[in-house]
Amino acid sequence: MEQVSLMRRRLFAPSVMSLVVFLATAAALIASYAAPIRPWYPSGGNVVHLDQGSASVGSISEATTSAGPYAISIQITYSPRFSLPLWPVLLVTAVLPVLWMMREYRRRRGRRRTLNGLCAACGYSVTGNTSGTCPECGTPIPLGSDAGT
Ligand SMILES: [Zn+2]
């Protein structure tokens, strides 16, 4: 039992971090479809660019500014160095939060079952059980709970 709760705690922080990356990636993915060309310039000559579900990093090879009658338009030519598809990132970062939620769901279900006099693992009624283990699946019944008394 203690090992299970330790594992849950060890999974929690990485799950939260994973979820943050997941949400940021989801936002970038939506932005990449909403406005295909959305470059920003983190440092000299480098361009980060979101386009149709992937993020790419490249360098500016040419930038020309032309003044029109109403606005100034900047034409940028850049050569991408690498491109990262965002869908796989979304998939990978979803694994830990989903695992954590599944574990949390099982823990809550187990606690609810124990409170109702049922086996935490399988849901079999263990009210009035004196053997200390579930007759259906063999899971030990925690002492001091309503179950098994
Ligand atoms: Zn059981």
Image (spheres, rainbow, N blue to C red):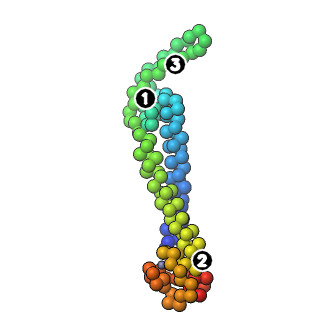
Q: Quadrant of residue 71?
A: top right
Give the left or right position of residue 92, taking residue 115 as reference.
Answer: left
Q: Which residue is mark 1?
A: 59
The residue under label 1 is which amino acid type? Ser
Give the secondary structure at mark 3.
strand
Instruction: From the image, state whether disc 1 or disc 3 is nearer to you.
Output: 3
Closer to the camera in the image, 113 or 11: 113
| Residue drawn at the location 57% of the way across and 15% of the way down | 72
Q: Which residue is mark 2?
A: 116
Instruction: From the image, state whether disc 1 or disc 2 is nearer to you.
Output: 2
The mark nearer the N terminus, 2 or 3, is: 3
Q: Position of residue 148 (x, y in %)?
A: 56, 86
For the C terminus, which image quadrant?
A: bottom right
Give the secondary structure at mark 2.
loop
Q: Which residue is mark 3?
A: 74
The mark nearer the N terminus, 1 or 2, is: 1
| Residue drawn at the location 51% of the way across and 87% of the way down | 132
Seen in the picture, residue 105 relative to 81 is either above or below; the reply is below
The residue under label 3 is which amino acid type? Ile
Crowd around label 3: few <14 · some 14–19 · many ≥20 (10 Å): few
Q: How many labels were placed on the picture?
A: 3
Report if the beta carbon of the residue with label 2 is closer than 8 angstroms to ligand 1.
no
The residue under label 2 is which amino acid type? Asn
